Amino acid sequence: MLQRTGPLQMAVLAILVGFSIFSLTVIFSKWSAFRGARRANSRFLRAFRKANGLEAVMVASEQYRPSPLVGVFDFGYEEVERQVKTRGKVVNRIAVERSLQLGVSEELAKLERNMQWLATTASVSPFIGLFGTVLGIVRAFLDLSQQGSTSLLDTGDDRMQQAQFIDGALWGALDTAFGSTPVSALAWFEVTPHLQ
């Protein structure tokens, strides 16, 4: 199939292969990060539930540092500690809730880093593939016109030879369309569950 693919179509295929490699890299890194965060969160929650006080949790949290829950806990603990130092007790629970919400949004931003690239890849790859397909079809018809024939029914040429030529040229055009499908599908199926 690739023998009749032109240089511009090969460039489109190279771009799609680049998008595929980049998407797979992001997918596997995110998969690893989410799996590690899930494990660290469960270990931190066990330590949190067994601890006698917030100070004990703070000391224990250092060993669970990659856990996103540790980051959220740090935000809340800093606010509680600030209020206890200034007033002797927790007075403003709304401030503690805001600190926890800020911690959650910061940890989510860390976990969602590079996800927008997958969404972009899922959106753009089909159009890049379509561009390559159109280029290939235009090339096929240009090559056909250079042969001096405008119809498959032209009696000056063997019809089977023309059909084989068109078949090969159009397959070269469709290479890029087939190349864009896995790229966009991989990126789309990785991004979609995380948008909700």
Image (spheres, helix red, strand yellow):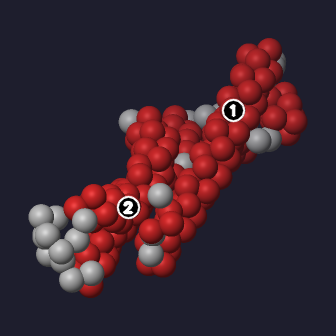
- SS assignment at label 1: helix
- What residue would you read off at disc 1? 35
Residue 82 location, x and y as percent?
A: 68, 47
Q: Is residue 40 visible?
A: yes
Mark 1 is on which residue type?
A: Arg
Give the left or right position of residue 51, taking residue 152 as reference.
right
Residue located 44% across and 75% down the image:
6
Residue located 61% across and 34% down the image:
90
Q: Is residue 172 above or below residue 92?
A: below
Give the left or right position of residue 66, taking residue 157 as reference.
right
Q: Is residue 166 above or below residue 46?
A: below
The quadrant the C terminus occupies is top left
Q: Is residue 18 above or below residue 33?
A: below
- What residue would you read off at disc 2? 168
Which of 141/20 is in front? 141
Which of 13/35 is in front? 13
